[in-house]
Image (cartoon, grey):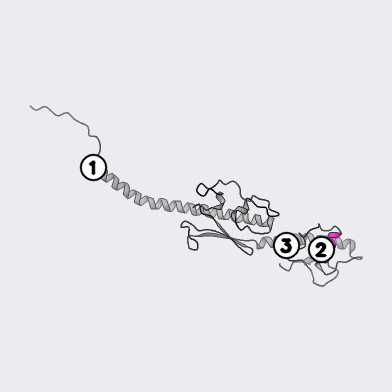
C-alpha cells in the first residue's frame, strides 16, 4: 500500500485572487472618491460662508469706530486709523498652506477679496475652482448706510440737547442765528458742546441745518441726509 502524503496547510494567495482583490479596491475607490471629494468641498463651502459672515460683522464694527469700511482683511486686526479699536477678529491660527492669517483666506487657502463701493462692502471667495466671476463663487455684501443713520441720530440728539440747554439760559439775550457754523461755534465757546469737528457734521460728513430753515431763534437742527 502507498503511504499517504502529509497534509500541508495552504498559505498565500493565488495570482487570480490578488487580481480580484485589486479590481474590487479599484471599483470601491472609483465609487467612494467622488463622494469623499464632494463631501470635502461641501464642508469647505460651509466653512467659507461662515467665515464671510464673521468678516462682514467685523467690517461693520470697524465702520462704527473708524467711519469707513475696510478695504482688506488685514485692517480688521491691525490698523493705525483714528478711532480704530480692534482687533475685530481674534482666535484664528495662521493658515498652514498660505502662512497668513486664517481669516485672510478661504477654506481652499485662497485670499478673500474686499471691494468697497460707497457704503457697500462685498467680500468674495473664488470658491473651489479659484476662478472669479462664475457660479462657484461665494460672496457677501454688507451695507454701512444704517450705521451712518444711527451715528447721525446719535449726534443730533447731543446737539439738540445742547441747543435746548443754551436756549434755556441765553434765548432772551443772545438767540441762536439760523446759521449752523455760527450755532456750532457758539455752543462750543459757551461750553454746551465739546471742541472739535466731531459734532459739526452728520454721519455722512454733511453739516447740520436749522429746522425749520431760516427760522429764528433756532430751537433744533436736523440732517439733510436723513
Q: Which mark is residue 132?
A: none
Q: Which part of the image, by quadrant, shows the N terminus? A: top left
Q: Is residue 13 left or right of residue 84?
A: left
Residue 219 visible in the snapshot:
no
Tell me the element at label 1: helix
Q: Residue at x 73, y 61 (%)?
A: 153
Q: Which residue is mark 3?
A: 152
Can residue 145 be found in the magenta stretch?
no
Q: Which part of the image, by quadrant, shows the C terminus? A: bottom right
Calculate the distance from the C-alpha at mark 3 to the C-alpha at mark 1. Answer: 82 Å
- The residue segment tinted magenta is 185-190
The outermost residue toward the bottom is 214
Q: Position of residue 201 (x, y in %)?
A: 75, 63
Q: Which residue is mark 2?
A: 184
First of labels 1, 2 by sequence position: 1
Residue 37 visible in the snapshot:
yes
Tell me the element at label 2: helix
Q: Which residue is mark 1?
A: 15
Amino acid at each position: 500500500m502507498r503511504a499517504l502524503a502529509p497534509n500541508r496547510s495552504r498559505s498565500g494567495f493565488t495570482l487570480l485572487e490578488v487580481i480580484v482583490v485589486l479590481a474590487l479596491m479599484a471599483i470601491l475607490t472609483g465609487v467612494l472618491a467622488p463622494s469623499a471629494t464632494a463631501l470635502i468641498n461641501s464642508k469647505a463651502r460651509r466653512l467659507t460662508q461662515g467665515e464671510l459672515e464673521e468678516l462682514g460683522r467685523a467690517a461693520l464694527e470697524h465702520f462704527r469706530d473708524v467711519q469707513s469700511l475696510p478695504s482688506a482683511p488685514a485692517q480688521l486686526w491691525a490698523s493705525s486709523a483714528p478711532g480704530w479699536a480692534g482687533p475685530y477678529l481674534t482666535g484664528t491660527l495662521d493658515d498652514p498652506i498660505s502662512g497668513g492669517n486664517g481669516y485672510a483666506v478661504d477654506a481652499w487657502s485662497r485670499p478673500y477679496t474686499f471691494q468697497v463701493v460707497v457704503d457697500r462692502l462685498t467680500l468674495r471667495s473664488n470658491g473651489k475652482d479659484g476662478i472669479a466671476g462664475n457660479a462657484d463663487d461665494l460672496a457677501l455684501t454688507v451695507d454701512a448706510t444704517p450705521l451712518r443713520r444711527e451715528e447721525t441720530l446719535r449726534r443730533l440728539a447731543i446737539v439738540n440737547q445742547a441747543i435746548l440747554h443754551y436756549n434755556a439760559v441765553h434765548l432772551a439775550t443772545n438767540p441762536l442765528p439760523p446759521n449752523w457754523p455760527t450755532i456750532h461755534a457758539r455752543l462750543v465757546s459757551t461750553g454746551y458742546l465739546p471742541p472739535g469737528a466731531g459734532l459739526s457734521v452728520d454721519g455722512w460728513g454733511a453739516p447740520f441745518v436749522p429746522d425749520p430753515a431760516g427760522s429764528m431763534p433756532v430751537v433744533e437742527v436736523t440732517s439733510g441726509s436723513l
